Image: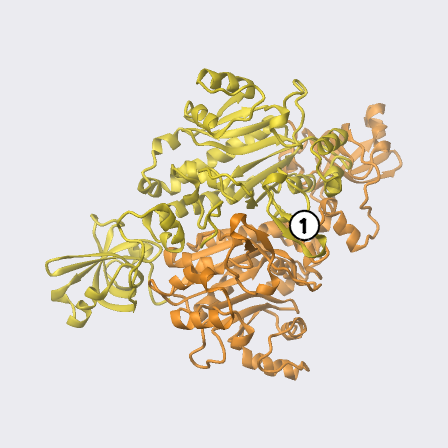
Chain colours: A orange, B yellow
């Protein structure tokens, strides 16, 4: 490679190097010109000095516009006041393309305009930092499950079984089978896999045809699901707590400068250590009523309830054992109170709300079949799922974490749409 | 946790432990009974001795069937002749569920029967080894790109743009937008992202509605795609070579026992070191004609061509610079021969054939627009893609590796269907 990345400047101090990238900004000051250049790995201030350059190189500066592509050759100099710690004293410039009328300027733009230009918006420093944090959250997740002896089982995306709620399914025609659905969850398949591998996880896209416009929903999102044979509900909460605490620790370690760029309150994240809070659904309802909510026992927590409830906490909080009718068919009945199930949701603090749904699964064949019938689910499509309760059924539990909700919380974003490179929502399919 | 995993037996030699798992097999010999138990982390031979057990525990043995679930308490003993190196001297058994008529027995079954029971088949030792190798290939990929400073950019699965070939698209209705498509590639989005982050990759499912029945195609497969700004075609080949060599080295290091279980010829994999072979399309055609193929210059390589060609090689081989008309619209015209494009396919040796497709991308606005029109693609949907050639266009290149084809080759499988937990094919949507 005959060029260097800005992030590697520390190895090239005093040397002449070539950088390839784009103009981020430029300004003049007397006989000095400043070009702020980005190359995807960092930003560097590049200094053009009329006295020290060939006139034909000096003159190229005036043509350069925001996002013009170029190759720039100069000497790397340490400069403690510069962002990144280095500057480049420019010898020559090779212009690759002059960008004409780049649409995203340093002035304010509306969010629809920015989303229409998402393919370019990703070049902006705020989006850059969010995607760097996203990259780290994902790698931390892969490392966590690998190091804790989980086997990755990629579950199918096109499926004949309905995962959660029939009302929010995307459909596709699948050859001669007729309708198939885009998966809402890999959980049912993970249940099969945990009987083969003990501890399993999947991490892929999930789809929800959400017809409402909220700041917490995407039509396509990434879903991290874990499932462990012989885990009961409390083991399940312990595992989630350990994983989420690991994520936060890793981001604080590796991405502090990106959190600072986003003006995230880092002290709030530093409080996220084990143990998290655990509050029963019953107590949650009482607390919400005290806080002025009109929620009644038996209702699911709405977005506003989640917000006012989690504003009370400085760490994530598990709400456990919800009423049967608020939850999916596969959850195990609570032996101590059959009106509730052995489940928990993990709510992020500071008003962010649900990031994980989880439960112990019904492991009794007859009870599960009864629930499938009650929900009027197509029994044929669930034959294989029922098999798991016939051939060596065991207690087992698992969870599903919404990646983008977690990133929204970690980054302190107002809306989930900035947490994914190319969001898909009710009114958004482009770019 | 009040039980231990079989893989951790080395830490419990001489201790009494409890294992939770399933009966894999059993047999008798005089006053000794042998239970082979699996728990997802390993297999252990468990010894029941009539003389040393309570009679009621001893009698449980006779009821146990294949895949019955149980909790078994005993003492861990080192035994160099045992697979795994340890045995368990059983004190007591707690039966969780007796499995009645488990469908997959040690006898031979037809592949359709096994695929119908894929949710159970994963418990078999051969499938277990393939999935362990798959898990390692995926983690190795994540590690490779992370350590080489690529940023993961998850590209959308539901999209308005057609990636490769309109004839093999799955469709879905997307709210009021009408038709949308399931992505065949994330490449176009990665091209946008590499202008923001320099080096990017994505790793998610891709979809092809392949109406033919072959042993190399899945309708849903996992796709690893990399894209780097300022890379030309040769940099691109170097990057792929480095990545694939890394994968093989890692599998040889971490999964040798699984390769042995699969009876893979390990010496063939040991030959896969850098550099790989590089043969122009022109020379490939000549060589194929010498080998008896009827292929003519201008034709794409068929599956049979790939097989007979790669049987000649002991390492992967790049075939580069194919004719324009065999390849997708976005590939850059070869300046030295405008009838060809700057591209390469990487073919795995031993007859396995294509695992990677790659190219340098057309970076000229006018030439790209002309190709989009020639292919009669919907210009509107590609507006954002054309923008990338307007605002600081740069040379860039990338590749796409089919995960399951790579696993098929590494594991030495006859058919791609065993390389993914729940395959989706022309005749397969269940389980």
Q: Secondary structure at mark 1?
A: strand
Please determine whether, in this image, residue B222 is positioned above or below residue B30.
Answer: above
Left or right, A329 with respect to B194, comes to left
Q: Residue reaching furthest right? A: A30
Please determine whether, in this image, residue B85 is positioned above or below residue B35.
Answer: above
Q: Splitting the image into 4 quarters, where does residue B333 fall?
A: top right
Image quarter of the N terminus of chain A: top right
Q: Position of residue A114 (x, y in %)?
A: 77, 51
Label count reads 1
Residue A141 visible in the displayed image: no
Q: Residues within 10 Å of mark 1 (few under 14, many from 20)?
A: few
Q: Splitting the image into 4 quarters, where does residue A12 fall?
A: top right
Residue B189 visible in the displayed image: yes
Please determine whether, in this image, residue A209 is positioned above or below residue A360.
Answer: above
Left or right, B100 with respect to A231, comes to left
Q: Position of residue B62 (x, y in %)?
A: 19, 65
Q: Position of residue A335 (x, y in %)?
A: 42, 79
Left or right, A82 with respect to A314, comes to right
Q: Position of residue A266 (x, y in %)?
A: 65, 61
Chain bearing tag 1 is B
Name the residue that disc number 1 marks.
B179
The one nearer the camera, A305 or A44, is A305
The one nearer the camera, A74 or B339, is B339
Residue at 45% across / 53% down in the picture? B430
Left or right, A360 with respect to A50, comes to left
The one nearer the camera, B323 or A67, is B323
Residue at 74% across / 44% down in the picture? A120
């Amino acid at each position: 490679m005959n060029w260097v990345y800005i992030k590697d400047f520390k190895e090239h101090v005093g040397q002449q190097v070539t950088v390839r990238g784009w103009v981020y900004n430029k300004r003049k000051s007397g006989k000095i010109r400043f070009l702020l250049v980005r190359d995807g790995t960092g930003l560097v201030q590049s200094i053009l000095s009329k006295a020290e350059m060939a006139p034909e190189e000096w003159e190229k500066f005036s043509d350069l516009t925001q996002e013009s592509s170029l190759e720039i050759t100069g000497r790397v100099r340490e400069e403690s006041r510069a962002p990144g710690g280095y500057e480049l004293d420019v010898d020559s410039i090779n212009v690759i393309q002059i960008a004409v009328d780049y649409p995203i300027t340093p002035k304010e733009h509306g969010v629809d305009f920015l989303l229409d230009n998402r393919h370019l918006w990703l070049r902006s420093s705020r989006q850059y930092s969010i995607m760097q944090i996203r990259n780290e959250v994902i790698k931390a997740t892969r490392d966590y499950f690998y190091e804790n002896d989980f086997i990755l089982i990629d579950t199918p995306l096109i499926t004949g079984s309905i995962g959660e709620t029939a009302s929010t399914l995307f459909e596709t025609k699948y050859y001669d089978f007729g309708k198939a659905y885009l998966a809402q969850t890999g959980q049912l398949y993970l249940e099969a896999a945990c009987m083969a591998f003990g501890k399993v996880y999947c991490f892929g896209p999930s789809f929800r045809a959400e017809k409402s416009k909220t700041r917490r929903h995407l039509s396509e999102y990434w879903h991290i699901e874990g499932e462990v044979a012989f885990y009961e509900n409390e083991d399940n909460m312990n595992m989630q707590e350990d994983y989420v605490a690991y994520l936060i620790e890793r981001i604080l370690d590796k991405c502090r400068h990106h959190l600072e760029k986003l003006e995230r309150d880092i002290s709030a994240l530093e409080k996220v250590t084990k143990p998290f809070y655990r509050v029963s659904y019953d107590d949650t309802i009482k607390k919400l009523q005290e806080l002025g909510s009109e929620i009644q026992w038996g209702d699911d927590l709405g977005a506003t309830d989640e917000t006012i409830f989690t504003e009370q906490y400085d760490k994530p909080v598990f709400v456990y054992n919800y009423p049967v009718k608020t939850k999916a068919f596969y959850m195990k009945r609570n032996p101590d109170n059959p009106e509730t199930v052995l489940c928990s949701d993990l709510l992020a603090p500071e008003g962010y709300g649900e990031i994980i749904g989880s439960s112990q699964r019904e492991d009794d064949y007859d009870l599960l079949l009864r629930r499938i019938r009650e929900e009027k689910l197509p029994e044929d499509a669930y034959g294989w799922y029922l098999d798991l309760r016939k051939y060596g059924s065991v207690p087992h539990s698992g969870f599903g974490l919404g990646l983008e909700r977690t990133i929204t919380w970690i980054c302190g974003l107002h809306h989930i749409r900035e947490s994914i490179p190319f969001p898909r929502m009710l009114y958004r399919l482009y770019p």
